[in-house]
Image (spheres, rainbow, N blue to C red):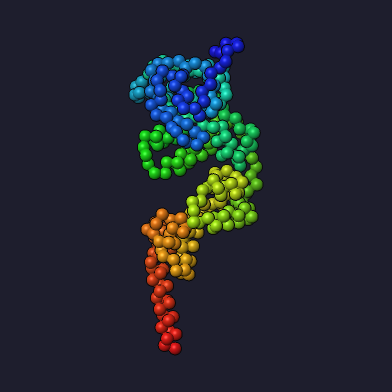
Amino acid sequence: MNTPGSTIKVIDYRQEKASDAFVPKPAVLSSSGWDSIYFEFHQQPKFDIAEHQHTMHVIAQGIPYSSLSISSGERWLDGKMVRERRNNGDIAIVPAGISHRCNWNTSVQFMILAFESELLQQVGQDLVNCDRIELIPHFMNEQDVLIQGILSALKAELESDKIGGYLLIDSLKTTLAIHLLRNYCTTQPKISTYADGLSKSTLQQVREYINAHLHQEIKLSDIAAIAQMSQYHFLRLFKQSMGVTPHQYILQCRIDRAKYLLQHSELSIADIALSLGFCDQSHLTRYFKRIVGVTPKQILQARRNNLLKSRNFFLES
């Protein structure tokens, strides 16, 4: 334990290679540029980590090298010591600012996820009283299947280079925050004032913003900010009000605008696609046919046929 007059060490995962001074070997994998969260995967020999504090909340998950191996050791959280058996997948939760120390009696693999305390506040701002959010310390003696899945997905993301990475990470962050608020925090529910979805004035502001920005990328964070609520809460209330998600609504608005322009402008299909935020003509055509049932070319052809019929009618009359 910390001796009187000594200064407790600090691990700040916002800094590069923050854990290197505390463990025998550097992390095998570590994240970079993930907003508000940081991930590491370790393979370490037997070791004892000195007492320290974290500037961010931390979740750790042990991973024995085989199903037959058993990792055990002791952990101190805020002055309390527990001997942990550490079965495969067990998790520990170490809130920011509390004293922490642990040791491992054998070679071990483990994952660490550090995240800003503001993440819980951002996701929970419309669900609970934010000044009552307190993450509860948790010793590594129980499994949590959802947290295991999130950590495994983050590790897989570091090991791959697939499309939509940041969207996936944002989704995992929100899922993790909601799960922690429900199961690992002391919170007091906030009485919602949105029993019937978004208010009419807020919904009108959101719809006006969407229609004014169909030509560019529309981020969920931007339209949630207009409604002055968290992205999670906005998603739920928007769907409650409109019957579709914001993404589905934005797509429908773009298709409706494309249909209008095909019928009332001289723009080409390619120009219409680019003016409404689609990658190219084929991108527009794919979604247009899925929603409208016909292709943009068929709309243009029908328009030309109608114009030709009208012209012939006037010539014959």
Residue drawn at x 44%, y 69% is: 266
Q: Is residue 93 above or below residue 262?
A: above
Q: Is residue 296 visible?
A: yes
Disc tally is 0
Which quadrant would the C terminus be assigned to in this image? bottom left
Q: Quadrant of residue 130?
A: top right
Residue at the top extreme of this rendering: 4
Q: Is residue 73 visible?
A: no
Residue at the bottom extreme of this rendering: 317
Residue drawn at x 42%, y 72% is: 303
> Horizontal placement of 160 versus 242: left or right?
left
Q: Is residue 83 above or below residue 159?
A: above
Residue 300, image x, y percentages:
40, 69
Q: Quadrant of residue 262?
A: bottom left
Q: Is residue 56 above or below residue 225?
A: above
Residue drawn at x 34%, y 22% is: 68
Residue 315, image x, y percentages:
42, 86
Residue 309, image x, y percentages:
41, 80
Residue drawn at x 40%, y 74% is: 304
Q: Nearer the viewer, residue 25 or 125?
A: 25
Q: Is residue 27 above or below residue 170?
A: above
Which quadrant would the N terminus be assigned to in this image? top right
Residue 239, image x, y percentages:
54, 51
